[in-house]
Image: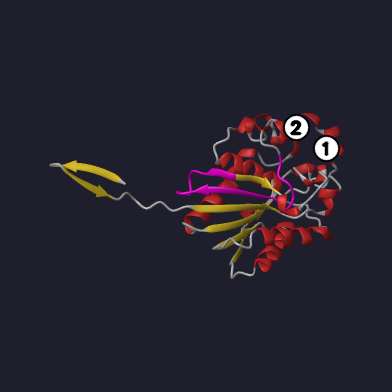
Amino acid sequence: MNIHNIFGKIIYKKGPRLTMTKVYLIRHGKTEWNLQSRYQGAHGDSPLLKTSYQEIELLAQSLKKVSFAHAYASPLRRARVTAQKLVSHLDQPIPLTIDSRLMEFNLGKMEGKHFDDVAKKWPDELNNFRHHPDRYNEEVTGSESFQQVIDRVGSAVKEFCRVNPDANILIVSHGAALNATINALIGTPLPHLKDRGGLSNTSTTILKTDDAEHFTLEKWNDTTYLHKTKVDPTDTI
């Protein structure tokens, strides 16, 4: 609200109304390859574990009180099925749109390989991928670059926010792609994208924006609703 004092009178002039879009970003349920510590990427796609369906129900219960305007999901089966099950459990008339921009990081030659095998074949690039995104050379493994993923997924997130002002939206995607994009959207420099740690299967991260360009982080990698008492390293990437 702007205040102007003209000839001793105070006139209140309302500024533009700000709207707030809240983005609930969900990593898909755990898969067979997640459990086996294999890279899935944009082309590998193993089935969800049976326990993942139960965890999706727990996720839905945690979101029951939130009204969603729209849901968006990666076309890869593990994310698409997670989104479909989640929306059905929420028991709301939520439109679901499948968008290829939400696909996982294309990991090139790493896809389908066990973490240990990748570590033996490309130790430097794996270390950079996990800890030093600014040093990662995607040409070595024929993968996407971090900036390509950020531009691809980020453009989708911003578009979804523009068409859903002052609303809550759901996005179901993948660990590596979401991690890079979320951190970039809140202004984290490329060398520090990994500082916050990874994202777990069936986790919720929440961003807020009032202009579909600038984002703030409200919640990071929440899995409290899964009631896990033991940390499994294969849950998080």
Q: Which residue is mark 1?
A: 118
- The dot on residue 172 is none
Displayed quadrant of residue 123: top right
Residue 209: x and y in percent read: 49, 48
**Do callouts 2 and 1 mark residues in contact (Cβ within 8 Å)?**
no
Can residue 55 be found in the magenta stretch?
no
Of residues 237 and 3, which is closer to you in this image?
3
**Disc 1 marks which amino acid?**
Val
Where is residue 86? Give x, y as percent: 68, 63
- Asked if residue 77 shows in the view, the reply is no
The residues colored magenta run: 198-218
Seen from the viewer's position, the closer of residues 186 and 62 is 62
Q: What is the secondary structure assignment of the residue under circle 1?
A: helix
Q: In whole angstroms, how far apart are the C-alphas of marks 2 and 1? A: 9 Å
Identify the residue under disc 2. Answer: 125
- State the image quarter where residue 53 is shown: bottom right
